[in-house]
Image (cartoon, coloured by chain):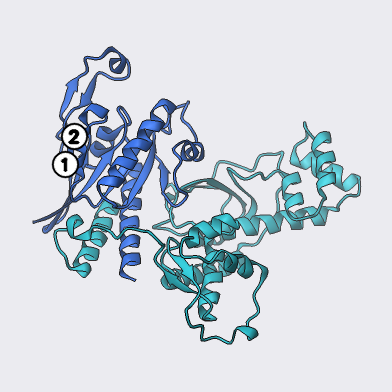
Chain colours: A cyan, B blue
Amino acid sequence: MALKGNLRDFSLIQLLNLVNLAHKSGVLVIEGQSDEAKIYFKDGKLSYANLGREENNLIAVLQRYQKISEAQQQVLLEKSTQMNDKELGLLLVNAQYLNQKDIIDTLKGYFVDLIRRLFNWQEGYFYFDPEQNLPENLIPVKLDLESVIVEGTHQVKEWETLQEEIPSLEMSLKFPDRPGANIRNVNLSVDEWRVVSYVNPRNTMHQISQTIKIDDLKMRKIVFSLLQAGLVEIIRPGGMPALPRDKMFPTKNPVEQKSMLNRLITRIRAI
Amino acid sequence: MQTVKIVVTGPFNSGKTEFIRSVSEIDVVATERKITSDSEKSVKETTTVAMDFGRITVDDDLVLYLFGTPGQKRFEFMWEILSEGMLGFIVLVDSTRPETFREARSILETFRAYAPTPYVVGANKQDMENAWEVDDMRVALRLDPKVKMLPCIATRKDDVKKVLLELLYNILAEMEVNDQ
């Protein structure tokens, strides 16, 4: 039977487990809400991964992980217009820019980072194609999935906890009127400072995360730590109109209203 | 029996009737008429003049109605009537016709003025060769980053479900925000 479905019903962790245990080879394609991911496997090990919208040729990856400078990147881009990743890797090794291990380790790091991001995808149609092999021009790695799966399990649990604590990033932050924490003893990271600098009832957490270019998970982590330290409070964004709930629902009871919505969601999922 | 409703709106020929047809358990009660105007006739043969009407029975006690609005501006008088008491609304936009983006934006703002209920935007006809990328459409429609915009093909049930679910998740999230 074809391996296909939706991440909502069968998570990426479950898929990786399946590939790992069954020593599968092929490509797993996940069509997310805003991007498409392809993960190639060979005998149950990850051999390559990419995101459709992300620049993921070898030069881009090496530059992103600071293995080559911007100046080197420019030179390589000019030289390598007709080169594929394998040829380029050989050029880098021959020119003693990097050795083979550097290149493979960097690619592994990139693929693990990419999978980490995919763990945050809650929805997405997927299918596994056992017939499709990695294109010859790409550099394959051999990455054991066990550690990725363990890390993913922790990440998903952390995500669930953070979602319970901060259900929506469409809320704003404000500084407490009477801070209880001993502020002098609080040390903030660079990213926490960046978030703090945008704390204002008019800025939603989502807007802040987009402005400072951090993903939802990181934003939730930072806000959670700021909340724990008593540095911020979550409030409704300024000027946001309340929902006309008495007109939307045939009942005024908020519990019944939410029950209706949950029943609607369940029903539509089942169509 | 309790009923709730969601409105599907958007410019002329954006795919509202197909969208409702994809998930409705009844044949959509469409109020289509043959088009007489030459400019509109070049796009499609018939159009919705009053409303489309679809139904999804949730259980013995709850029914969801889907109302599709007529797309042309001259039927605007229908919009306010249809928007009364809606849970939220979906704005469908034809990804292949950038000339309708401005109108889509105007429809969105009109509905938002009728009721501050949650809404999502569906970038329809994404299977067409000349369809705009969702990100580009978002810029063209000047959508706020927090507004959800989903690629979709209105004839595909799964795509329609995704759009409907996204709207319901938004409504739930806003209710929780309001309750805090």
Residue B52: x and y in percent read 18, 35
Residue A54: x and y in percent read 62, 45
User: Answer yes or no: do the residues labelled 1 and 2 have beta carbons within 8 Å?
Assistant: yes
Q: Which mark is residue B77?
A: 2
From mark 1 to mark 2, how far is it between C-alphas? 7 Å
Q: How many marks?
A: 2
Q: Residues within 10 Å of mark 2 (few under 14, many from 20)?
A: few
Q: Residue furthest right?
A: A95
Residue A255: x and y in percent read 22, 69
- From what the image shows, is residue B120 above or below residue A222? above
Rendering quarter of residue A114? bottom right
Name the residue at 36% across, 31% down: B103
Q: Which mark is residue A254?
A: none
Task: Tell me which amino acid carries mark 1.
Answer: Ile
Name the residue at 41% across, 67% down: A167
Rendering quarter of residue B155? top left
Q: Residues within 10 Å of mark 1 (few under 14, many from 20)?
A: few
Query: Circle 1 sits on which residue?
Result: B81
